Structure formats: structure tokens, C-alpha cells
Amino acid sequence: MTTSAPETTDSPSGFKGRVDRFFEISARDSTISREVRGGLVTFFAMAYIVILNPLIIGGFAPDQAALDVEGGYLPNAQVAAATGLTAGVMTIAFGLVARLPFALAAGLGMNSFLAVNVVGDVTWPEAMGLVVINGLLIVLLAATGLRRLIFAAVPQQLKTAITVGIGLFIAFIGLVDAGFVRASGASSPPVQLGQDGSVTTVPTAVFVLGLILMGVLVARRVKGALLIGILGTTLVAVILEAILRLGSSVDNPGGWSLSVPALPPAIFALPDFSLVGQFSFGAFERIGPLAATMFVFTLFFLNFFDAMGTMTGLAKSADLADERGDFPRLRSALIVEGVGAVAGGATSTSSNTVFIDSAAGIGEGARTGLASVVTGLLFLASMFLTPLTQMVPLEVAAAALVVVGALMVAQIRDIDWSEFSVALPVFLTIIVMPLTYSIANGIGVGFLSWVLVRSLSGKAREISPLLWIVAAGFVLFFVRGPIEALLGT
């Protein structure tokens, strides 16, 4: 999925040569400059997490935060600092160990689940302790090879469907984040174009401008297309904000969704790492082992299969996956991703996992771990440069996501739709992801429908026993609500 013109990829000598050989840059038909650009684009596409994660699990005051069972909350500034720290360290580690262009940060599904479903029964440190346990289980499965066996058991058609579904999902995320698609407030249709069927706000218009600009640049194969589009559209947004004074959508319905694109009064801010190490395993005593185990089970499924689906989609979009969907250093990637979950719990930032937004950098041409190192260094810098990261509005990042989503959906050409016992599970995998706003849901429905439809169609012998086991696990995942109710959680 290369969006830029071919560049010379002869392996250089000296320090550049060592970097090239370590990351296999020339071997993957890339260049150092392309990897740096890809790392920059991935960071700009993901920088919102430094702002958004504190808003989801933290707050500026008790009356503006997710309170735990004892009335405690996570201070916004401390969450922001820890979010940048953990994302930076884990993304660099992933780049150096797995040497793939995937970036890690606090997973949005996981942090929302913690804020909404978990901390009403346990404290924030205890919730983060559950995240640590979830991560240790994932590391154990990855180290023993079982996670890779599960990965290998997934049929190629489903792996391709996961890629396509993720493409639709991130495009839908972009459209919603930009306000181009909104909830209608009615039972039917549940969503609509803009406000009452019209584009009514300047930020959404900026999104449309960015989408067109990036689309044209990608179509013309301009080097740095997405990066140029992000920076150029941000500049337009800053100028418009200076003239119109729209402010935040919290105060003005026509304002910017998350960060207001304005020149910051200061460039530097000192980070506060007080939350690092603030986790506890006291949940098992507070709510009992069964209820705590159920929470861990849910966290595990969200983390395990979101990451598996995301890495599958990213590897295919980067042309790094083979015909079975495997990609280089798969085991190392799975282990480091599991360590990210542990690190996220240990720093009170929620489980850190591979971000689908990495597709933005891949769309820019990133193919190696050097891009991840660049992204990770920028995340570390963001701890001190928070005012600058807040200049890029969510509407601009959303445009990049839609463009990348379109590039990923192109993988649909590799799916054989002629056999309906394949077509139905593949279709369900693709469509459930955006409609339920969850990669894990799409994978679960895909797995369940695959084993049921294929086996009842006389194809049972072609299904891996591991896939049956995973499908059974998803049955528990989908009915976890009634189970938790029976357990009194």
C-alpha cells in the first residue's frame, strides 16, 4: 500500500548502513527518509490519545472524572504524562524488538471499559492491577507459542476480512470524530449526515478539506502525502480559529471536538509521573475471586483479539504478511504487545496495545521498526510538548484515518465470494466491526459464524480445533453480561 513515488533503496554504508541492515529497510523496499516520514505521520494520527485518554479515565476535578468505588479519580495531567511515557517506551521497544511499523498506546476500548464497567466496583489501582494480570496472561501465551498457534489457526479469508473490517472501522471512526456522521437521536436511522443531514460546522468543513487534500496527494503519489495533508490542514484550522474563535465543542456546539487548533501560549510543560507504579491486586479481596476473574476474562478477550486483528490488518496493508497472514518476528511482536498491557496497568494508563492508527504511517510508506522508533521518540517528547500536540485538531487526524481506511478496504479484492459458507462469515466479520465499534466483536462474530456455518455445510474437518476452542471462548465473551449479573458484579 505505497502512496509515494519509488525511491532509491540501495543499502547505504557507515552508520546509515547499520541502521538499514538492523531494521531491514532496503530489504523491505523502503528508505530511511520514508520511515521517518511514516513515523511522523503515525504520531500525528495518534497524538490525540495523549489528550483523549486522560479525558476518559481521568479528570481535572472529582466532579469531572470517572470516580472509583471509594470516590478516587486519576488527575488529568498525571494521566497525560504517563500516557506519553508508556506509549513512547513501548512503541520504541516494539520498533527495536519486533522491527515492525506498529505503534502502541492506551487502547480506547479497554480504557472505556475500565471507566464505565470496572471502577464502580473496585478502586483505580485495583482496576489497573487487573490490567496487569491480563497483560501477564497475554505474555505467557505469547512466550509459550500458544498465541501464535491461535493466530495461525485463523483461515486466510478471515484474516483478510479482518483487514477490510478494520479499514471500514477506522474510516467510520474518522467520519464520526469529524462530525460528518452523527447520531440522529432517533431509533431509525440511528446515524445521519452531519446535523439534520447537513454539514453545519467549520471543523467538519475542515475535515472535508483535509480529506480532499490528502486524497488528491495520495492519488498523485506525492511523497509525504498524509504528513503534508495533516500539517497543511492544521495550518488552515489554526487560521480559521484565530478569525472565528470557535473554541471547544464543550462550550460551542459548532466548535472543535477535542483540541482547539490555536498557537499555544507556551511550548514546554513538565510532566508529572505520580501515577507510575500505582496499581494493586486487591480486587480479588474486594469483590471476590470469581467476579475479579470475570473482569480479567473480559479484559483479556478485548486485548487479545483486538491486537491480533489490528496486527493482521497492519501487516497486510504494509505488504509484510505472507499468504497465510504471518509476518516477520510475529512471536516477538506478540510478546512485546503483551508487555504493553502490563506496562499500561503499571503506569495507570490502561492496557497499551497496537494502534490501528499506525496504518497512517504505513500508508505513508513505513515498513520497518525505524518508523516506530520515530513515533515513540515523539511520544516521549509529547510529555514536554503537550501544548504543541494539542494544535492538531481531531477533525484533521480524522481525515487521515478515512484515507487510510479506503486503502485498507482495497484488500477485499483478495476474498473469494463464490462460496457462501465463506462469504457469510467474512461479511459478518467486516460489517460487525464498524457497526458495533469494536474489532473484537467483529472477530468474535466471524469466528463463531465460520465454525458453525462451515461445519454445518460439511466442512468441519477443515476447521482447526483451536478455532473451535476460541469460538467457545467468544460465546462466553458475548454472554458475559448475564454471567456477571449472576455473579453479582
Image (cartoon, rainbow, N blue to C red):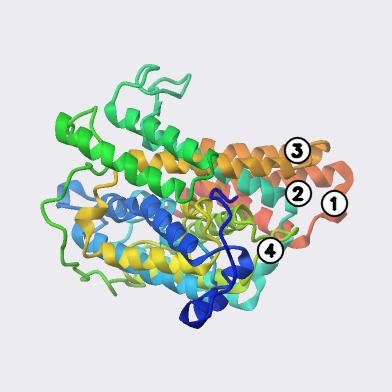
Element assignment for label 4? loop
Measured Cα–Cα span from mark 1 to mark 4: 23 Å
The amino acid marked with disc number 2 is: Val
The amino acid marked with disc number 1 is: Ala
Between residues 416 and 118, which one lies in front from this camera angle?
416
Between residues 439 and 37, which one lies in front from this camera angle?
37
The amino acid marked with disc number 3 is: Ala
Q: Position of residue 335 (x, y in %)?
A: 54, 73
The residue that label 1 is drawn on is: 460
Rate crowding at label 3 as few (under 14), some (14 to 19) or many (20 or more) other CA atoms within 10 Å.
some
Measured Cα–Cα span from mark 2 to mark 4: 21 Å
Q: Nearer the viewer, mark 2 or mark 4?
A: 4
Residue at x 61%, y 63% (from the top left corner) = 29
Q: Which mark is residue 423?
A: 3
Q: Position of residue 63 (x, y in %)?
A: 16, 47
The residue that label 4 is drawn on is: 326
Q: Is residue 17 above or below residue 201?
A: below
Counting residues from the start of the chain, the first of labels 2 and 3 encountered is 3
The residue that label 2 is drawn on is: 451
Counting residues from the start of the chain, the first of labels 3 and 4 encountered is 4
Measured Cα–Cα span from mark 3 to mark 4: 22 Å
Q: Are marks 2 and 4 in contact (CB under 8 Å)?
A: no
Q: Nearer the viewer, mark 3 or mark 1?
A: 3
Measured Cα–Cα span from mark 1 to mark 2: 7 Å
Counting residues from the start of the chain, the first of labels 1 and 2 encountered is 2
Q: Position of residue 178 (x, y in %)?
A: 36, 34
The amino acid marked with disc number 4 is: Asp
